[in-house]
Amino acid sequence: MRKQLSMMANLLCLGCLLSAFIWYTFEESLEFHRPLPQRSASKPSELCKGCKEAIDKVKKLYNQTWKKQEENYHRFRLQLNINCNGSNNGIITQENTPVGSKIVCDKDRTVIPVTPVLFKAFIKENPFSKKRWDTCSVVGSGGILTNSGCGKIIDSADFVFRCNLPPLENEFKNDVGIKTNLVTANPTIFINKYGSLTGRRRPFADSLHQYGNSLLLFPCFSFGFSRGVCQRAVYAIEDMKIPIQPIFLNPLYLERLVKFWKSQGLKEYRPSTGLYITSLALELCETVHLYGFWPFSNHPDRLFPLTNHYYDNVPYNARVHSMPNEFYHWVQLHNKGVLKLHLGDCKSGQV
């Protein structure tokens, strides 16, 4: 009997150690590490299907010598402001969404009543009202940023937008910078990476420290199921006293934005994070610089392979987003002098 109890105790201890090891391994796996870069030219057989033709088309369209065209810029900015008005209506606030009102999700049309609990999570006033910046960097997460050396020039802007909680520290800092004034967080990140925030929230909270006291923009009201996980994210930020400021994207703004871009010839199911952030930046900033926007899996110069993101190779959902079509619109706006699209390495001056 004593021998059996001893064996059970040993098994129990072994189980505890195994559980601890699994959890430690899981937490370690949450860290991002840059995929190994490949800078040599690709053979024709290694290029993605249709990429050579598409890249050649972009290089013919893309104007290397860029100059801001004030008339084109102000015309496009006015169109955005009239049709979308992101500078005033892009964010849900306690001023524009009072207790007792209803939020209609822009995709599945779920109606969400604004309760006192939900209302408390809204920022009191619009952080963009009557504010403008001279220069803004909008930083995508494309693999084109790998070894680009663009970190310092990105950080030199007055306001820096970033997409979907990207890693900035350690080996990434030189290429993407670290300054952040606004960073977005898609609810699917909370679901897929942080287990819907139903368990331990420390890894999520720790990941936010690199963004300092920036604005954290949630597009939480496109689908009804997103509300719960977004509220848990807000609770985690409050409970752990993270200095970041959560704000919610207004679904009415997204609806208007989709209609506007359809009128510009962009017909897709859902705008990407880069699309709505760049649109917002064009209303708020005098000069907008885009970095990390490149939808192809080969570099524009020597055609060597690129990972989808500078920190991983997870593909985007092509059934939902149309990245090449969005990108061609950025090229057109670049050529018109409305914004500056950076496709080269900053360290070599090819920006």
Image (tube, rainbow, N blue to C red):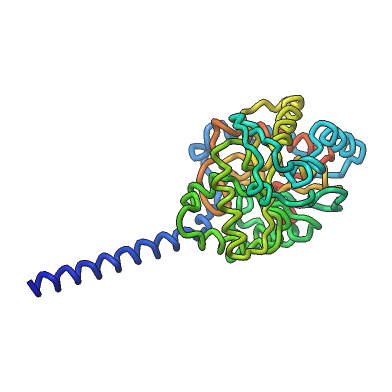
> Toward the viewer: 341 or 136?
136
Position in image of residue 146 (x %, y %)? 60, 54
Answer above or below: position of 150 versus 340. Answer: below
Q: Seen in the image, is 71 located left or right of residue 243?
A: right
Q: Quadrant of the N terminus?
A: bottom left
Residue lying at 66% horizontally and 41% vertically, measured from the top left = 114
Position in image of residue 206 (x %, y %)? 56, 64
- Residue lying farthest to the left in this orientation: 1
> Toward the viewer: 230 or 219?
230
* Residue 273: quadrant of the picture: top right
* Residue 64: quadrant of the picture: top right
Position in image of residue 207 (x %, y %)? 57, 61
Residue 54 appears anywhere in the view: no
Residue 78 appears anywhere in the view: yes
> Toward the viewer: 230 or 186?
230
Residue lying at 59% horizontally and 45% vertically, measured from the top left = 186
Residue lying at 29% horizontally and 65% vertically, measured from the top left = 18
Q: Seen in the image, is 298 located left or right of residue 256?
A: left
Answer above or below: position of 85 versus 291. Answer: above
Q: Seen in the image, is 309 located left or right of residue 124?
A: left
